[in-house]
Image (cartoon, helix red, strand yellow):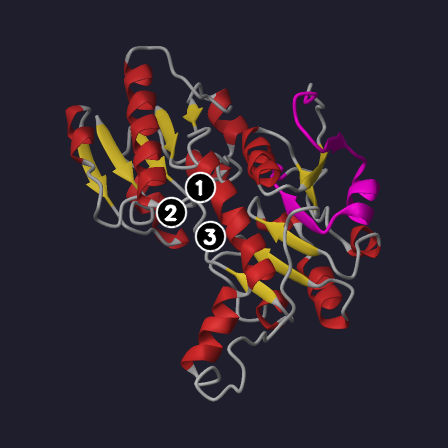
Amino acid sequence: MKIVILDAFTENPGDLSWDWLSAYGEVTLYDRTPDDLILERSKDADILILNKTPLREAVIKELPKLKFVALLSTGFNIVDGVVLRERGIPVCNIPSYSTNAVAQLTFAFILAFANAVSVHSDAVHAGEWVNSPDFCFCKTPLFELSGKTLGIVGFGKIGQRVADLAEAFGMRVLAHSGHETDQSARKNFAWASLEELAEQSDFITFHCPLNERTEHLVDAEFLSHCKPSAYLINTSRGPVLDEVAVAEALNSGKLAGAGVDVLSVEPAKADNPLLSAKNCLITPHIAWAGFETRARLMEILKDNFKAYFAGKPQNVVN
């Protein structure tokens, strides 16, 4: 059995181990695979392991030995699952491994806007406190989260964990989801339409999958309903935002700020409008990158392998 990992580095930059895979066959590992080498590196594989390397129909047709595709991610739009299903090849993803980490980064963005820690630390290191006539100074208005409204679009496990944290901060929560569940035990919580959520929220955070309904969900129309004092947070999928529309709203003062961990094209392109937009915090898709989070992913991958070789594939997404 030949096992090929096409993009191993982001999951394991050296602090985890792939040694366990050798129990299942011969392992070939590539830290990264450019598009023009996908077929060459995959052609003799029985099993492919990949994260963001695309696996499309044209390549799949040239892989006669392929039997199993194991993802290093929750999202699975990088593979042509229909074609693989037609050939009886299961695609297994990694669900529910990053809930805590994504919720944590969401609040890192929220707190960055509320407390402006880096702005003030930079000012102190630049000598502004040393030369200040006062014991305290503010570079930008600061505010408490208690009493503010957090709008959550997408209310699965991550959205619900974000709501838990919001409750701890004394925030009111509005949520929008295609599937409303009983949340009567939550304090200061209500379901809302997208328009209601946009109009009332001080922060709006997105935890929805990418599909036809959510692509460019945040467009000029959506933004026209937001408060000029509102902040957007996106840790879901880059294309959920119309990046041109968001940049225009930030630059024109129709939106106070945005924090994004994902972009429509990754790595970021130099001409992405958010890179130069006002008050836009951007992190390089790191919500999932904490050691504990990646270690949890690896354990689920191990379980997916055990299940596949036992003849009972789990977490099949096609």
Q: Position of residue 165 (x, y in %)?
A: 55, 38
Disc 3 element: loop
The residue located at (60%, 50%) in the rendering is 234
Q: Quadrant of residue 195?
A: top right
Indicate yes or no whether the magenta region holds residue 121: no
* Residue on which the image places disc 3: 285
Which kind of residue does numbered mark 3 sit on?
A: His
In the rendered structure, are the residues bearing label 2 and label 3 in contact, judged by CB atoms less than 8 Å apart? yes
Please report whichever mark, 2 or 1, sits nearer to the chain's N-terminal start.
1
Q: Position of residue 87 (x, y in %)?
A: 45, 21
* Residue on which the image places disc 2: 289
Tell me if I can see residue 294 in this picture.
Answer: yes
* Residue on which the image places disc 1: 101
Badge 3: how crowded within 10 Å, few (<14), some, or many (20+)?
some
Indicate yes or no whether the magenta region holds residue 186: yes
In the rendered structure, are the residues bearing label 3 and label 1 in contact, judged by CB atoms less than 8 Å apart? no
Q: Quadrant of residue 315?
A: top left
What span is colored magenta in the figure? 183-210
- Please name whichever residue, 307 or 188, is drawn nearer the observer in this view of the structure: 188
Which kind of residue does numbered mark 2 sit on?
A: Ala
- Please name whichever residue, 52 or 150, is drawn nearer the observer in this view of the structure: 150
Q: CA distance from mark 2 to mark 3?
A: 8 Å
